[in-house]
Amino acid sequence: GQQLNQSPQSMFIQEGEDVSMNCTSSSIFNTWLWYKQDPGEGPVLLIALYKAGELTSNGRLTAQFGITRKDSFLNISASIPSDVGIYFCAGPGGSQGNLIFGKGTKLSVKP
Amino acid sequence: NAGVTQTPKFRVLKTGQSMTLLCAQDMNHEYMYWYRQDPGMGLRLIHYSVGEGTTAKGEVPDGYNVSRLKKQNFLLGLESAAPSQTSVYFCASSYTNLAKNIQYFGAGTRLSVL
């Protein structure tokens, strides 16, 4: 089945640094979703992208839908301790349009 | 507005025991899903439902059964728990599974099978 490859798997950064992560697919997606999972909680939607080339921001977070429609990027500017968590990309690549998820990027922020 | 509520939050089972995880949503969503999350594996779909009275298999359905008797509830059952089913289970719901499929998740059930 289809897979989403997320990188990096984990990141350890200093507070105030910018963060970049990406997600790639072997096939074309028409939607990209980015979720964040806080420790001990369920994933929460951060940003949804619906058009190739689309750039969308949510506070300090910016996500882009790649032109090839096979990738997406998430950037976090000026990271803070509460950015800690696992970031998942997702897209409708499963059977009957169900979402498939990347394996996540685990972010750790040192104050 | 509670969103998606899962019960229980934690459970420890012995091998061979059975249990049911309950998911309830108050958003009038048609679609509901059960996932399991294992370290380094992301979220994998177990079963899903496209409406009241319907269920379908996902990516990893073996060892699990589900029922959707009411639109707002989606139950996940383990008939004979195995250590390989130790995981964190998440329920989610969505209005549609078309292009703008945004799923809303519960807080999870942490299950250990000894």
Image: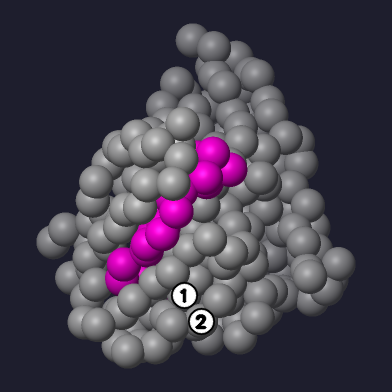
Q: Do dots 2 and 1 share one subunit?
A: yes
Tell me the chief SS of the magenta region: strand
Q: Disc 1: which chain?
A: B
What's the residue at 60%, 14% (across, down)?
Answer: A14
Q: Residue sitting at 64 percent across and 67 percent down?
A: B59
Q: Which residues are magenta?
A: B74-94
Do the CB atoms of the residues marked 2 and 1 lie less than 8 Å apart? yes
Query: What whole-number distance in Å separates the C-alpha atoms at marks 2 and 1?
Result: 5 Å
Q: Nearer the viewer, residue B17 or B32?
A: B17
**The residue under label 1 is which amino acid type?**
Tyr
In the picture, measured across the screen, residue A17 lies left or right of residue A46, that is right
Which chain's residue wears label 2?
B
Q: Position of residue B88 (x, y in %)?
A: 45, 43
How is the rendered protein coloured? one colour
Q: Quadrant of residue A4?
A: bottom right
Q: Is residue B59 visible?
A: yes
- Residue underneath mark 1: B48
Q: Amino acid at mark 2?
A: Ala
Judging depth in this view, the residue of A54 and A96 nearest the camera is: A96
Instruction: Please give left or right for residue B82 compared with residue B67 in the image.
Output: right
Q: Which residue of the protein is positioned furthest toward the front in this rendering? A: B16
Name which quarter of the figure residue A11 lies in.
top right
Classed neighbour count for the residue bearing mark 2: other residues with Cα under 10 Å, few (<14), some (14–19), many (≥20): some
Asked if residue B33 is among those painted magenta in the image, a careful observer would answer no
The residue identified by callout 2 is B56
Q: Residue drawn 54% across and 12% down?
A: A110
Q: Position of residue A19 (x, y in %)?
A: 65, 33
